[in-house]
Image (cartoon, helix red, strand yellow):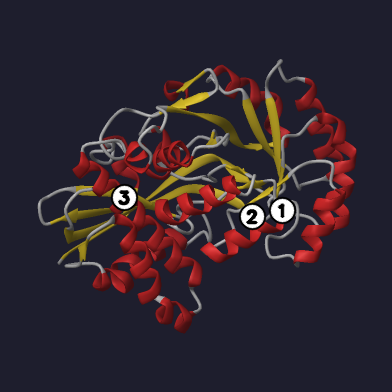
Amino acid sequence: MTAPVRIARLAAEVFRVPIDRPVETSFGVMRDRPAVFVRLEDTDGAFGWGEVFANWPAAGAEHRARLVMEDIADLLLGREIARPGDLFHALTAETRIRALQCGEWGPFAQGIAGLDTAAQDLFARRAGMPLGRVLRADAPGAVPAYASGIKIADAPEAIPAARAAGFTAFKVKVGFDMDADVAGIRAAAAALAPGERLFADANQAWDVRTALDFAGQVAACGLGWLEEPIPADAPDADWARLAGACPIPLAGGENIAGRAAFARAAAAGHLAVIQPDLAKWGGVTGCLGAMRAAIGAGRLACPHFLGGGVGLAASAHLLAAAGGAGLLEVDVNPNPLRDAFGTPGARMRDGCWRIPDLHGLGIEALPEEILRYRTLSLARPA
């Protein structure tokens, strides 16, 4: 345990990278890759990095950064923190009325999530240890990982490329066209090498009947899970009906927020796989609690993430600290805001993502090669 710290400076950096090939999901298309990185610094000069969810809406990245700097910073700067998790709980309570007033529960939670991760990084850096080992003394130096973000139509090329980078598990996006989705799943499953695994993500595309139709047609393909086949906020009765009849384990969690909501999801048993996203809610503090509770309830806990290099590094430490048999999600679509921190090919070995044995998250400064993509830079001293 390190001594309390006093926050002296806060910065938020926004980046957008143009991409030649949009990233498609069943609910929309990403035409660039954004990221919001936040940095906390204490009065001794120690610092920590975090990442705030910025994928949606399209104009969300700059808004999130301004919200952190103009609506949350006054509650943070000059504050003394005894433990990193204290910041998450305090800011969540103190911004409740602000979020209620404007109806922006998600953006406030996302900003606090990034700040929590930065606080966790700062404290681990002061302790002189990797974040994962601060959270769990015997945290491993590598975690199983899977290649994600693969549109089913691109699977014939994308899965072999991911395999060449060291992955042995792959997640494809479906929810576009039923016949094409089913044919693509069958082809991808048939092309797997021995020991490889395949998952599918529908991104909330269907109703219960359509989801069961899809699951029935691909039941023989051995999918490890089917992620968000129906809307995350569908009635519990719909999830129960789906879970009771679906031959494929169900996964979800990126669109769940709050300790009570995660506890209900784990207890209900509809989801075999719980997937909190540390950039969307909870940061390291909230998501570690959610994952450990899920594991305790007999669920598989896998952090969800589709963003830049800071959040991916934090997700790896989170998974290492949580334990269990979960896998790290690694988006394999082109993204300099991720790859500048360490490409999948450089980090993957035998299906596992290697975690550098460095202090905190192991990130000293933002890589020089991404600075040309910066769209906004904000900073405030105490």
In the image, farthest residue toward the front: 296
Q: Nearer the viewer, mark 2 or mark 3?
A: 2
Dot 2 or dot 3, earlier in sequence:
3
Q: Secondary structure at mark 3?
A: helix
Q: Quadrant of the C terminus?
A: bottom left
Q: Tell me which residue sits at (35%, 76%) in the image.
A: 94
- Label placed on residue 266: 2
Tag 3: residue type? Gln
Residue 95 sits in which quadrant? Answer: bottom left
Residue type at numbered disc 2: Ala
Element under label 2?
Answer: helix
Residue 303 on image: x %, y %:
53, 44
Q: Position of residue 199 (x, y in %)?
A: 70, 36
Q: Element type at marker 1?
A: loop
Q: Which residue is mark 1?
A: 269
- Residue placed most toward the observer, 279 or 272: 272
Assess whether mark 1 and mark 2 are in contact (beta carbons under 8 angstroms). Answer: yes
Closest to the camera, between mark 3 and mark 1, is: 1
Judging by the rendered image, the residue that carries numbered circle 3 is 120
Amino acid type, residue under disc 1 in the picture? Gly
| Mark 2 → mark 3, Cα distance in angstroms | 25 Å
